[in-house]
Image: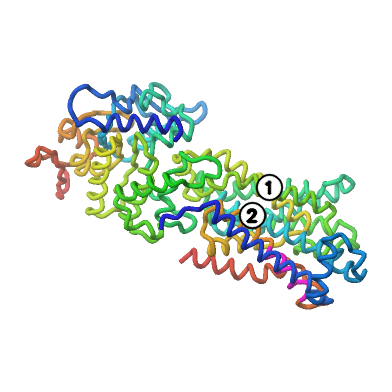
Amino acid sequence: MMRALTPRRLLLTCTALLGVLLLVVFFSLKFGTRSISVYDLVALLFHAATGRTDLVSSDFRLIILDIRWPRILLAMIVGASLSVAGASFQALLRNPLADPYVLGVSSGAALGSILSLIWAAQLPGATPFGAFAGALAATAAVYFLGRRGGELDSYALLLGGIITASFLSALIMFLMTTISGRELRGMAFWLMGDLSTPSPVSPGWLLLVLVLGVAAIYTTAADLNLLLGGEQEAMHLGVDVVRVKFVVYLGASVLTGLAVSVSGAIGYVGLIVPHLVRLLFGSDYRLLIPATALGGAIAVVLADTLARTLVSPTQLPVGAMTALVGAPVFIYLLRRRMT
Amino acid sequence: MNPVEKAAEQQKTASTAGPASPSPPEPPRLSVDLASFSYAPEGGASLFTLEATSFDVRSREVVAVLGRNGSGKSTLLRLLAGTLAPLSGRVKLEGLEVSRLDLRTRAQRIAMVQQENPLLFPVRVWEFVMQGRYPYSRGLRFETEEDAAVARQALVEAGADPLRGRWMHKLSGGEKQRAVLARALAQQPLLLLLDEPTLHLDIAAQVDLLRRLRRVAMDRGYAVVVVTHELNLAAEFADRIVLLDRGKTLRVGKPSEVYEQALLQQVFGTLLYVEYTARGTPKVTFSGAETE
């Protein structure tokens, strides 16, 4: 009965989730406007893995390796970032409904990256950095709006997030009307959350930032478990609350900035994935963080595959897919919390 | 086992080894020496002052802090917990100033039971109790067999063992308080602080909790300080009383030395009577009649 989390259980859970992720990626590579047989796909992957891409037809190589795979990789990075950011915000703000999108942090990141496009488009890495700065500022704003009498009030926090999001959206609309019309459609699509445009930053860098951000937050996993019971209690149990909050605040903002700078504001992933993972594996953050990263990758690859194939050949923005599922779940969680 | 833990363990065995013989006199575990505190906005007049107070708490002793709301009970408790540093004077636990201990060391020596705090996500009772082992673990802090054994022992001592598989948020007030006590015991502290632990409990649960507290204080050699509003329970279960009034420590002593009718009437601002039970314990009764 008194079975605490063991490294073995952690490893088993993550391996199982990794298996599911590989399966989802495989089918995401297979399905699309042009479907590819399992046999052809396996052959292609085998040749690609052994470096003999010359044996593959150039058609398949283009579709699978140059179009679908980069997009899937992006989806995995974005999904993992948003989910871990969501789980972190939930602990940091002591609010189970926290999510980068709901809190307006994604809007802050979007505004930051648009501003950086306007002012410093020629600088390398300007967009991700702008997104990170925007996420930091928005988190700080929401944090202060959500305080009442020195304590974080969960409803004031959600309202603060919604107000921040709509105010920032208005600013974004204003800025977008000043950007030339040619880019407007792409921008509008990007704001809805979209993975069809390749990232200006190489996937290697994105992966590195993802790993660093998640690792930083993971060092505080045991502390976050105690922080869920209140800051005072955590402090009496020996948690350095100030340090933990700082690390998580920074880490979650980096992850949100990373996700938004490559894919725009994909909503609700950071809300739904941590909740599902909690239902399946419990709420111990030492397991929750890696499981949520893998679960988020699975969820966004799935959502993007649906977005690509549902009304093919037209493509939906992936953010529309996640919002279609996420908004009702949010309402459900909110109502359950109020009763 | 790290050196601090070892030292604490040795001290504990040393203090529980012998029978409760009067000699040699044991040094007090917690000593409060002319400690004071003042809340003041920057450069402004102070909003509240806890005037210099002095008392000791020995191992196996239960001390109750009494006073009206706003008398400084919570401030005093925070000084004892080391989360506030005294403005003047000293609060020492086994000779070390508590506000200077680093967070982990402090959590290994002082456990605090606070008023109810809602949990964000569902947690099982044993997981909650296992949190008490946090100050002893390192890195990712996977719990060891020893941690599990200590937590199990704490569950038994707090009377929460039958609850261990249940969800924290589905417990009654009394059950929850036992789980909270178990987590504090799992910290294996030298000093146990409780902030109104009997609030919202029915009378049976109040008595049950205080009995358990007395027993673990005796068995484990803890020093216990309880802040409470329950005058009669304090008289029954506490060895000594610290009586606070508007930031002043009016009296420190055995219940029979502190429970004077005139003094209590003055402090609590209401008509009350002090009687003595057959066992010599003071008992406070209140008049239902309107005061003149």
Q: Is residue B91 magenta?
A: no
- Residue B188's place in the image compared with B170, above or below, is above
Question: Residue B277's mark?
Answer: none
Q: Position of residue A72 (x, y in %)?
A: 77, 63
- Residue A169's place in the image compared with B239, above or below, is below
Q: Residue at x 61, y 46 (%)?
A: A248
Q: Which residue is mark 2?
A: A84
The answer to which quarter of the image holds residue B36 is top left
In this view, the residue in front, A290 or B62, is A290
Q: Residue at x 45, y 56 (%)?
A: B123
Question: Mark 2 packing: few (<14 Cα in 10 Å), some, or many (20+)?
Answer: many
Q: Is residue A303 magenta?
A: yes
Q: Residue furthest left?
A: B278
Q: Which residue is mark 1?
A: A213
Q: Position of residue B219 (x, y in %)?
A: 25, 39
Residue B261 horizontal side relative to residue A106, left or right: left
Q: Residue at x 22, y 40 (%)?
A: B234
Distance from disc 1 to disc 2, alpha carbons, whole Å, reads: 9 Å
Q: Are marks 1 and 2 in contact (CB under 8 Å)?
A: yes
Amino acid type, residue under disc 1 in the picture: Gly
Residue B21 horizontal side relative to residue A179, left or right: left
The answer to which quarter of the image holds residue A83 is bottom right
The color scheme shown is: rainbow
- Residue B210's place in the image compared with A278, above or below, is above
> What secondary structure characterizes most of the magenta part?
helix
Q: State which region is magenta.
A: A298-309
